[in-house]
Image: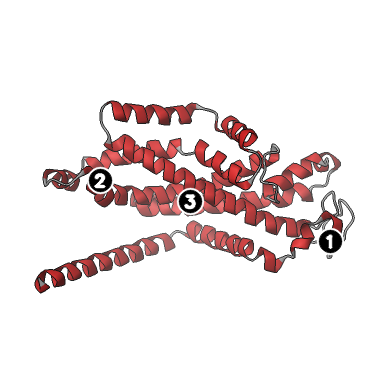
């Protein structure tokens, strides 16, 4: 009994050591990608800025009744990014907008990845009519216009951050599901999976111990790319008037266009949030490409 317990403990320690070593190896491979490091630093800086928004900027700066500037003032020493149509400084709006946009983008991406991974695993492991039904559901969400469905959901559920998260999450998981399905089918043909099945392992055990760990690196790489897409989707929906009621980069663009800033030449109202979206999405793309190179070393020379 004691011998078995010691053997089990040794096995667990060995497995833990292997996982730690694998993480170190992957980190070293990631660190050799300059673009990935730059993207990670940029994302970390924006995340810190969003988390410390109440410390960096007073919430009263968002209140139009407490605006200290005149409408449409260009960038100056007092207002580094100018003022909006209500006389509010654009810089606090940009800081608080980062909090909303990144939170919605991350939450919607997590929802999309969970749904896509679940359906992808089901489509890859089920057989017969069950697999056909799952694939038809995936195909339905793949061909339906995501923006139109998101607008409909926003109109039905009402404007809120939760609505935006649900709308983006529900409309963006189908591509992930097909990718996970392809990876699942590839893993199921591996020798170690066939040996586990021949030894009597259940389908749940095979999925949990062999299939899911094999697809998680792909899910992680796709997640980092999907966050950028989700941020753009949030900005698009906010630009179309479907927002959570708070300040985000999308609502800043919507208010700038609604106040005629583009026509009047008040460029700072459009450049500030637009450039923030561009930088964050580019950073997520760089991180995703670096993770993809770590997962598939053959891409290292491309």
Circles 1, 3 touching at the beta carbon (< 8 Å): no
Residue at image position (36%, 61%) is 26
> Regarding mark 3 in the picture, which secondary structure is present there?
helix
Classed neighbour count for the residue bearing mark 2: other residues with Cα under 10 Å, few (<14), some (14–19), many (≥20): few
Circles 3, 2 touching at the beta carbon (< 8 Å): no
Q: Looking at the image, what colour scheme do you see?
A: secondary structure
The dot on residue 108 is none
The residue singled out by tag 1 in the image is: 76
Residue at image position (72%, 52%) is 272
Disc 3/disc 2 C-alpha distance (Å): 28 Å
Classed neighbour count for the residue bearing mark 1: other residues with Cα under 10 Å, few (<14), some (14–19), many (≥20): few
Disc 2/disc 1 C-alpha distance (Å): 62 Å
Disc 1/disc 3 C-alpha distance (Å): 36 Å
Question: What is the x, y in percent for residue 151?
Answer: 62, 33
Q: Earlier in the sequence, mark 3 or mark 2?
A: 2
195 in relation to 148, above or below: below
Residue at image position (71%, 56%) is 94
The dot on residue 204 is 2
Question: What is the x, y in percent for residue 170?
Answer: 50, 38
Q: Quadrant of residue 98?
A: bottom right
Asked whether the viewer can see residue 255, the reply is yes
Q: Earlier in the sequence, mark 1 or mark 3?
A: 1
Of 61 and 37, nearer the camera is 61
- Given this view, does label 3 or label 2 mark the residue nearer the observer? 2
Q: Earlier in the sequence, mark 2 or mark 1?
A: 1
> Regarding mark 1 in the picture, which secondary structure is present there?
loop
Q: Is residue 278 left or right of residue 255?
A: left
The residue singled out by tag 3 in the image is: 224
Classed neighbour count for the residue bearing mark 3: other residues with Cα under 10 Å, few (<14), some (14–19), many (≥20): many
Q: Is residue 189 left or right of residue 74?
A: left
């Amino acid at each position: 009994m004691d011998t078995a317990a010691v053997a089990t403990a040794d096995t667990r320690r060995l497995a833990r050591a292997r996982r730690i070593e694998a993480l170190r190896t992957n980190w070293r491979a990631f660190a050799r990608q300059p673009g990935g490091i730059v993207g990670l630093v940029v994302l970390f800086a924006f995340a810190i800025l969003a988390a410390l928004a109440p410390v960096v900027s007073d919430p009263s700066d968002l209140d139009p009744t407490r605006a200290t500037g005149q409408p449409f003032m260009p960038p100056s020493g007092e207002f580094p990014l100018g003022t909006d149509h209500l006389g509010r400084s654009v810089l606090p709006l940009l800081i608080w907008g980062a909090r909303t946009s990144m939170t919605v983008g991350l939450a919607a991406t997590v929802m999309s990845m969970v749904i896509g991974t679940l359906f992808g695993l089901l489509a890859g492991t089920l057989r017969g009519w069950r697999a056909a039904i799952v694939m038809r559901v995936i195909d339905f969400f793949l061909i339906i216009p995501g923006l139109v469905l998101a607008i409909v959901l926003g109109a039905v559920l009402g404007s809120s951050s939760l609505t935006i998260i649900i709308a983006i999450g529900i409309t963006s998981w189908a591509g992930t599901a097909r990718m996970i399905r392809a990876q699942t089918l590839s893993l199921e043909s591996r020798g170690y999976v066939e040996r586990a099945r021949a030894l009597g392992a259940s389908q749940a055990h095979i999925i949990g111990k062999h299939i899911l760990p094999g697809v998680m690196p792909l899910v992680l790489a796709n997640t980092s790319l999907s966050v950028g897409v989700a941020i753009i989707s949030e900005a698009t929906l906010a630009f179309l008037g479907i927002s959570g009621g708070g300040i985000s980069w999308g609502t800043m663009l919507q208010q700038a266009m609604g106040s005629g800033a583009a026509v009047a030449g008040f460029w700072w109202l459009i450049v500030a949030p637009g450039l923030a979206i561009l930088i964050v999405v580019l950073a997520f793309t760089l991180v995703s490409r670096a993770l993809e190179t770590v997962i598939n070393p053959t891409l290292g020379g491309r």
